Amino acid sequence: MGLAMAAFAVEDMIIKTVAEAMPTGQVLILFGLGGMAIFGAMARAQGSSLWHPGFCTRPLIWRAVAEVSGRLFFTLAIVLAPLSLASAILQATPLVVTAGAVVFFGARVGWRRWLAIGIGFVGVLMILRPGMSGFEATSLLAVAGMLGFAGRDLATRAAPRTMTNAQLGVFGFAMLTVAGIIALCWTGGAVWPTAAQAMALGAAVAVGVLAYMALTGAMRLGEISVVAPFRYTRLVFAMALGILVFGEQPDLMTLLGSLVVVGSGIFTLIRSRKPE
């Protein structure tokens, strides 16, 4: 899980760097096509087809909508806002998933976890600071992306179990390509990638596939209650890269809000393994 989160942070860093000279939509398209090619080859090597009837089911349609919105808005967030800020807001995803599981799947959540969820959202407000001098409007893109990813995770729970990880990977990267097409149609300005940009995007694809495989391995092979809290190491890696690569300087309120969100998320994960 730690490897997966480090790889995701590096992927975000590369995309943010490439998007400085190339339209964000084009970056998403090329990144999505590269990921589709790799996972498509993996699916064929495993003897499974690239198409699965489950792609047309309601959960996967909702997953597609959530994936497109999550990918589009979060990519715009890491391009336009500080990487550390966008990554801090993303850490609220498990809290939204827990609340959504109650609404859509009838999950039972006790008062302690509801309290932790509420405190976690206070942490998000500490990071956002709406109406205060430190407020950045672009941070709302990270909120929209986080909600999209939470919807994707909820829909994934209802995905057909006969669908392989490679098929889900093809589907996910295909939706990333769709998000890129939407963004590029809005902004235009596609350019021919330079050799350096092409190599950077190739590296991003390789790191992104590694992240997905490491995440899947952690969730399937490890004890969920043990490995899940390590999702929050992504924030550490993202802040380190933001400081070292982009010269970002997260202020005290962002750091405190991040601690509140991460602490609430870890408490929620721990409580989920105990009877309410």
Image: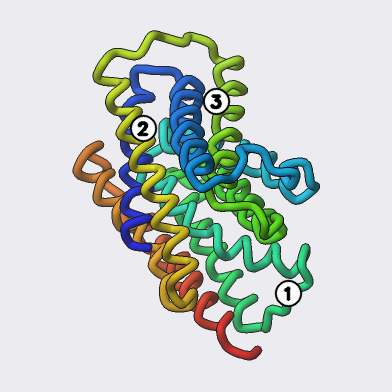
CA gap, disc 3 to disc 1? 34 Å
Q: Which residue is drawn at the image coordinates 41% and 32% (left, top)?
A: 79
In the image, what residue type sits under mark 3?
Gly
Which residue position is annotated with label 1?
A: 107
Is residue 76 visible in the rendered image? The answer is no
Return the x and y of residue 148 as percentages of the image width and height.
62, 46
What secondary structure is found at the residue carrying circle 2?
A: helix
Which residue position is annotated with label 2?
A: 16
**Quadrant where the N terminus lies?**
bottom left
In the image, what residue type sits under mark 1?
Ala
10 Å neighbourhood of mark 2: few (<14), some, or many (≥20)? many
Q: Nearer the viewer, residue 166 or 253?
A: 166
Of the two numbered discs 3 and 2 on the same chain, state the one appearing first in sequence: 2
Which residue position is annotated with label 3?
A: 180
Of the two numbered discs 3 and 1 on the same chain, state the one appearing first in sequence: 1
Mark 3 touches mark 2? (CB < 8 Å):
no
